[in-house]
Image (cartoon, helix red, strand yellow):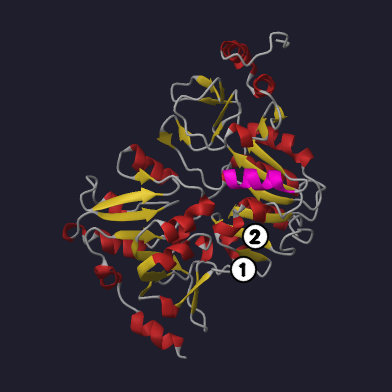
Amino acid sequence: MDYFSEYRQKLCTPEEAVRCVKSGDWVDYGTNNSYPALLDAALAARRDELKSVKVRGNLMQGPVQVAECDPEMEHFVYHTWHCSGYERKLCDKGRAFFTPMIFRNEAWYYEQFLTVNVAMLSVAPMDRHGYFNLSCALGINRATIDKADVVILEVNEALPRIHGGFCESVHISEVDRVVDAGYRPIWEMKAPEPTETDLMIAKHILPYIRDGATIQLGIGGMPNALGELIAGSDLKDLGMHTELCSDGYLALHKAGKLTNRRKTLLPYKGVLGLAIGSRELYDWLDDNPGVAGYPLRYVNDPAVIAQNENMISINGCLNADLYGQVCSESAGTRQISGTGGQLDFVTGAAMAKGGKAFLCMSSTYTDRNGEMHSRIVPRFQGDIITTPRSQAYYIVTEYGAAMLAGQSTWQRAELLISLAHPDFREELIRAAEEQRIWLPSNKR
């Protein structure tokens, strides 16, 4: 079979490719670095021809042209599964809408409930067998392709080719149209430099990690700080099983800590679902047989996660209340990010033999007016609960780590107040008393 002849037959310009979109259609874009920039621009150029085209995406760096060109949303309505900083601003302006989900269920949503008229996504170049690699977004995009009536690929030579366990590729025979984008630089996200608070939080977690542990790191300053601490520690033979692979893992690899040889599930393979980071990270992942990408319905399945003995899950959160409920995705009703895979990994790590799940935050934050607020609050007022109190295990601030499992309401209140900034502890004790979750004999 001459797959390159089939490729040439399906090759077209972005403008020709998007002519299939009709008013009222549901169009799905690939996530993060599989965002199809040329196709998005071509679709936006058709604005005045179209009405009520619904577009889904997530974790976009931006700008998304269909959202930018139509602030009144008469022609295009943009929806995100998980807010990036750019998408958060769109939602703040009422120019995009958030769709709640748990990442492991996203493929199931497509299979059972959703319509996809056109799927548009960016992929790595086709190989001699006719396969395009789904690259940094292989954890999600296969489900979109399988449900779509029309599949359009934007081929970008800058995307790494990530080896996979399954569902990491799409074949030319499954594709309707192909657009050649050449080499277009992809999104590089540098993790913020860890603060002194990040380092203090990381130091509280480090003693819980043992040789041979499998690590899931979220993204941000604190996980990056922990990666640096581990890289400089005596720990060895660590493994990777993570929803999102970021530069923290590259640091562990460069320090010789990330060998994956002692994993009880898929030994010698670092497992990921998505990748966002530096160009150096993408180059490390490219054609690396020591890394395997899988759909998030597999990577994030708690029953799969739990097969990794000594599984350590480390994620950031925004706030916790005195009952142990955790919010990681909203400030009040303002959407900040999304549920993502946090609850998946909290559940799976807790189920694993020797596993532990950590939710981390600074004890305070300072608002735009310079006023300091506690991240540990008496009770939530409209914030979206990401991890319920029944599944919150280790909570960590710069003041220590507290294990909540099996603790009563007054014990939780006491432990959480011990993690709060000292300036807020008396206020939190008074609130706990009012909420009848404070033992009168507790030490103040």
Q: Residue at x 47, y 47 (%)?
A: 101
- Amino acid at dot 1: Gly
Q: Are marks 1 and 2 in contact (CB under 8 Å)?
A: yes
From the viewer's perspective, is residue 318 above or below residue 22? above
Q: In which image quadrant can residue 71 be found?
A: top left
Where residue 107 appears, x then y in whole percent?
A: 48, 58
**Residue occupied by mark 2:** 271
Q: Is residue 345 magenta?
A: yes
Q: Is residue 417 magenta?
A: no
Q: Which residues are magenta?
A: 343-352
Q: Residue at x 20, y 49 (%)?
A: 74
- Amino acid at dot 2: Val
Q: Secondary structure at mark 1?
A: loop
Where residue 189 appears, x then y in whole percent?
A: 52, 51
Quadrant placement of the C terminus: top right
Looking at the image, residue 274 sits to the left or right of residue 228; the answer is left
Camera-nearest residue between 360 and 38:
360
Where residue 252 appears, x then y in whole percent?
A: 71, 53
**Mark sitting earlier along the chain (1/2):** 1
Give the CA separation, mark 1 to mark 2: 9 Å
Where residue 11 appears, x then y in whole percent?
A: 34, 79
Task: Specify whether residue 224 is in view.
Answer: no
**Residue occupied by mark 1:** 165
Q: Main secondary structure of the magenta part?
A: helix
Task: Specify whether residue 68 is in view.
Answer: yes
Camera-nearest residue between 274 and 201:
274
Q: Secondary structure at mark 2?
A: strand
